[in-house]
Every structure is written in structure tokens, then in C-alpha cells.
Image: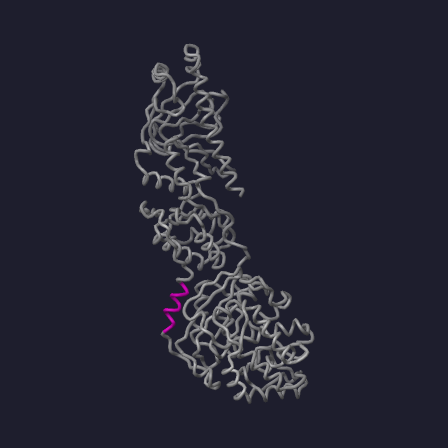
Amino acid sequence: MLMNDVDPGLAHAPVTMPDPILSYLQQLHDEYRDLTDGATANYIPELGSADPSSFGICLVTADGHVYEVGDFDLPFTIQSISKPFVFGMALEDRGRDAVLSRIGVEPSGNPFNAIVVDEASNRPFNPMVNSGAIVATGLITGDDIPTRRARIHEMFARYVGHPVDIDHAVFESERLTGDRNRAIGYLMRGFGMLEGDCEETLDLYFRQCSLRVSCRDIATMAATLANRGVNPVTGERALDEDYIPDVLSVMSSCGMYDYSGEWVYRVGIPAKSGVSGGIIGVLPGQLGVAVFSPPLDAQGNSVRGIRVCERISEDLALHVLRVHPTVGSGVRRTYRAGAARSNVVRPAAVRTILDESPDAIVVHEMQGDLHFTSMESAFRAIADDEMLPKTQFVILDFRRVMNVDRAARALLTSLAEVMTGSSRTLIIAHADHSDAPTVSWPGLATFGDVDEALEWCEEQLLSRAALRHHPTMAPLREQELLRNLPSEILDVIEAIATVSTFPARTLVIREGQPADALYFVLSGVVSVRLDVGSSGRQRRLATFGPGLAFGEMALIDDGVRTADVVTDTETTVAIVPVAALAVLDAVHPTLMSMLLRNLSRQLATWLQRANAQVRALDA
């Protein structure tokens, strides 16, 4: 168990925590920005003049949170990344059967601009190669070319969340050098796959490829596909959910040109690249990722983009064939220790010290299988906490966590480092409930359950506040249950009390024994424990230190003990038989009433705290 002390002078400083996910992306950017392999797409003159040092990375979650580094807002033309989105639009316009009668869904095994078709059907092999993409553009409906062009622009605007425009220099460059695409277009018309004016459709296709976007834009487009066709930033639907599997399927098998098979094997994320240097990846239900870097490899894919996506998939365990049960959020519930303290029963003066820092400890109940996406949402829950400036300890309750994968463990370690850097401590409770015992947790404090974690945090707060408020001894006369008793009565109680010292881990009271005495803790610590289940496991119900009494219910009920009481440390107690108190009450008739009044006051305090805890946990 690691205990990270926090400077109390820094505990309430209004600091912003560094984001470990953003830091990770920046690390990748720093690692690959000096990679000089590849060349820009000089067969289109305007693309060939792109700055090879341009490099951006962006990740957008399915609930709309954006992480971006480098040249994430630098404009470039969308090129072939437009293909899956126009294919989706064609499916909406014409229906699945009509589109598939003209465009196949098989990998071609040829370059993206190859002049080949499926010999059995004369269809282009798939919508990700130029022949299939030109046919898909020709399937977009509209009364005339301006209407169809406007509809395509509006469709992309829904994906990116703002209007899009044309890079006219790139458009003219493509149109003037697009003889091979013209040959493909006329071949498709000759085979009956393309209707209408071929030049008009090609003009529309060149314009579609020349739309100006940024790395952030294409990451948002990818996240929209991940979010069942709804833009997660604007909330606007861009594609009918029914066609999402169609689009992602062809992206998986055909989206990375001749590299598609190896991409699926190595990266395992439905993807599409473009010769301007963009790559998008879609992890359904979780996120969209984009990389922009103009230098391309022999297959026409961004060199840096391939490297970054391979690393992200490997480091964050994002391969689509890796099973991740869907969880809306890694955080089930959050509450603060001001409403839910540990089971340690403390004297009033000590409780006051803790009550002065109700926001110092926060508990996040985690749930499900923890992987990159669920941990990303957990990071935001922690970082967006409005009480974070006052927080000193963050407890992650793993009681409902079933598994923690490699990526989540790495991110948790990063989060612990961030916490330490911002004068906070990250703690894991119930770590043994998941697969956590099989791994180490460097930099993290770990406890068996939340109650133990809360107690440790409270002890840290008390020790930093002032040691004098945390008594290690309490004479019988200073016991809370005996408060306000006359001095002569206290003299008699001291006379009838038996003082005993018990070693640590000694049973003081056994469940089922007669309830015939009160026990006052003079020094040391004891805990009330109850057997749960048939395994012999015990749960701590309460812990008492100096100044507090246990076994006090004997004043009300002369039945039997309902739980065990065990010493946590060497403990000295004063034992007062209830029968002796009854005799004393006959001489001092106010004794029992005063004891019961003090007991009622204690029970009322505990009940109020229990009510507050129930409200906090049921919120």
C-alpha cells in the first residue's frame, strides 16, 4: 500500500489537472513528427505542394469529447475519405438493393484507381475504389447538378457540424489531370452502372473530393459513424442508423487500398484514407480517430497516419475484434465523503475537523469492464468535478468492476501520476474484486474496501489538521457517554470499573454473549465485526477509539451481543457492569437518565449521518 502525502498548503489550490489522454496523443505526435518517410501525392499538382511537416492527431468520443494535438485545425481536401460517406448517402437515396446492383462490396486486390471491374457482373468491386466511388456519386438524387451538389455539401456539413466549402485550386487541378478517372467514368457508363451525363457526374465527384476539412472535422465524421450516425458534438443525424453496418463493413475490408487486409490484422478498426494525407478510424459505439500527415507510402496511405493508428490500437487495445462489453460510462456513481464517512466512530471534536473538509475525499464507483473508452469517461468525471480544487483524495471503487484490461491499467497509472503532480492521491478500493491482483499498481494506494480507504484518507486529513485533535488516550472522566455527569458520580463509576488491557487482534466481545457491561476505550482501537455469508468473512460495522464506548446497548436491552468486538491495536478499556450501574442509580436517581440522554444524543448523530449517507448513495 502506497501512501502519498499531500502538502496541505496546496490542497485547495485551484489547479487544472493535465489530461493523460491528451498527454498520450502529444507523446505520439512528438515521437513521429520527425518521421520523414513517404512523399506527397504529386500526381495531383496541388496535393504535391502540401507541407510534408504538417501533422495532426484528433480523437472524438461517441459522446462528443474532443482530444487534439498538432495541426488539428489545418485545412486540407478530403479526397477519398469522402467515399464511405457518399456511399452511405447513396444507400439512403436509392436503397440497399439498388446500390448493390451497381456497386459490389468485395476487395479488389488492385490499386484504387485501377480500370477493372467484376467480370461476372460488370460492377466496380466496391465503393472505396474510384470506379465504385464515381458510381456512388452518380446515384445521389436531385433534379439537377446544383441540387445534387448542394445535397452533398449539406450531408458533409451534418457530419462535421459546420458548412463545408471547396478548395477551388485543388478542384481545378484534379479536373485538369483527371483523365484516368474520366476513363473509369465512361467505362462505368458503358457497362450500364452509371447513368446520365458522365462529365457532370465526374465534375460532382471531383468537387466532392475537393471539399476542405481539418483533422478535427474528419475525426468528428468518424465519431458520427461510431455514434450510430448522429454527430456527437451537434446531436444532428447525418446517416440513417440502418446503413451504418454497410458503411463500416466496406471500410473494414476495402478502406485502406492495397493495405486493407494487413490494416484489419494489425489495427482492426474500420478505416478510410485519402491521398491528401488523412486517415480516419471508427470504433463503433466508442470513438472516431483521425490523423493528418501528407507524406504517403506506396499504397497511398499516410506514413505517419499508419504508424500512429497502429500505436493507438495497440496501446489502447482498440482492435474491433477485442471484445469490450458496452458500458455507457465507467463511472456508476459519485459521492463525497462529507456525506459518507468511514465506519470509524469518532469523538465530536474529531468529527468537527472532518466536517470542515466535506469535499476533500471523493468516491467514484466504477463498473463493468474497464478499457480505454470507459476509463476516458472516468477521467472526464474526475477532471470535470466542480469540487476538484478542494479534493485531496480520489477513491475509485472497483467493487463492480469485472476486468481491467492492459490499456486501462496503463491509463490508471498515468492518472495516478497526474494526481500526484496536482497534489492529490489516487486510491483503488476493492482492487481484489477484479483481475487487479494479477498486476501491480505502481503509484497507487490500494485498499481492500471503500471503508478502509475512507478511514485512511480521514486519518491523513486529521494528521494534517492538528494532532491535538486526534487523541490517543482518554481518561474515563472524558468519555462522551459520561459527559455532564456530576463529579461525585464519576468518582463512583471509576471505583466500580475494571481496567483491562488486550493485545492487538484479541476478541473482547463474542457474538451471542450476554450483554451485561459497558466498555469505555481509554487507549487503542477496537472494531465491531459481523460474520457475512458462509465463508467466514467478516465485515467491519464500526471502529471506536479513545473517548468512545461500545457495548452501550446493554443499557437498553439486557439480551445478547449481536456482533464480535476485536482489538485493532493494543487496547485498554474500562469495563463497567450494568448491574453495578443499576445499584448506583438507586443512590443517584438521575444517573441512568443522564446516561440514556447521552446515548440518545449519540444515536441521533449516527442516525443523521446514516440518513445523509443514504441520500448521497441513492442520488
Determine the main secondary structure of the stretch shown in magenta: helix
In depth, the one of 522 and 406 nearer the eye is 522
Q: Where is residue 613 in the image (x, y as percent from the top left)?
A: 49, 38
Picture quadrant where residue 154 is located:
bottom right
**Residue 472, relative to residue 361: is it above or below?**
above
**Residue 387, relative to residue 211: is it above or below?**
above
Q: Position of residue 571 (x, y in %)?
A: 34, 29
**Residue 401, relative to residue 191: is it above or below?**
above
Picture quadrant where residue 518 is located:
top left
Question: 149 left or right of 389?
Answer: right
Question: 112 left or right of 407?
Answer: right
Question: 520 left or right of 46?
Answer: left
Bounds of the magenta span? 24-33
Verify whether residue 32 appears in magenta: yes
Q: Position of residue 260 (x, y in %)?
A: 52, 75
The number of discs equals 0
Picture quadrant where residue 113 is located:
bottom right
